[in-house]
Amino acid sequence: MFDVLGSEIARQILALASHQPLSATKLAEHCDVSEPTIYRRIHALQEYDMLDEQMEIDDDGHHYKRFRTNLEEARFRIEDGQFSIDIQLKKDYSDKFTDFWNDLEKGAKDVSNDASADSRPDTSSSSDISGG
């Protein structure tokens, strides 16, 4: 995580994407680096959930990704010979509700699948394949 935040480009991405979601192309233009460089930093930031990805569809039906900052705060602490970092991520309430609802639906499907599996008659058969 320290390596990721130590990158000037990663910090620029976080700052730029905190104002509004931006495409990798726009981020590359603002940072004055190539898109492959931007994508490497994007993937590193996403590994630590500091950057969210949104799929956008334009009027012509073309799909593209835009990125927004998910990092709200990072605090570094040195105390008693230890170095630590405290990361606080922001999450919209609508995102939290969607995550909750998806988990609830997944749990209901799991319970339904378990119940239907328990009510099915056992039609399996065993056979001796040892040849003896």
Image (spheres, rainbow, N blue to C red):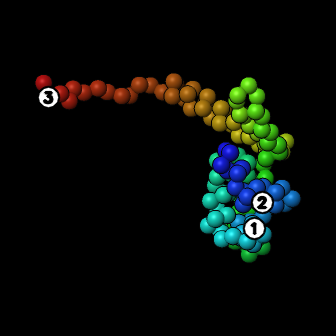
Cα separation, mark 1 vs mark 2, equals 7 Å
The answer to which image quadrant residue 124 occupies is top left
Q: Is residue 79 left or right of residue 37?
A: right
Q: Residue furthest right?
A: 19
Q: State the image coordinates of residue 66 (x, y, percent, origin top left).
A: 74, 62
The amino acid beneath tag 3 is Gly
- Which amino acid, by three-letter code, is at mark 2? Gln
Mark positioned earlier in the residue sequence (3 or 2): 2
User: Measured from the top left, where is residue 70 in percent x and y?
Assistant: 78, 48
Q: Specify the farthest residue to the bottom.
A: 60
Viewer-proximal residue, 18 or 129?
Answer: 18
Q: Which residue is mark 2?
A: 12
* Disc 1: CA contacts within 10 A as few (<14), some (14-19) or many (>=20): some
Q: Going 74% across and 25% down the picture, which residue do you hit? A: 80
Q: Quadrant of the rendered structure where residue 55 is?
A: bottom right
Q: Residues within 10 Å of mark 2 (few under 14, many from 20)?
A: some
> On residue 82, which mark appears?
none
Mark 1 lies on residue: 31
Report the residue marked by disc 3: 131
- The x and y percentages for residue 36 are 61, 67
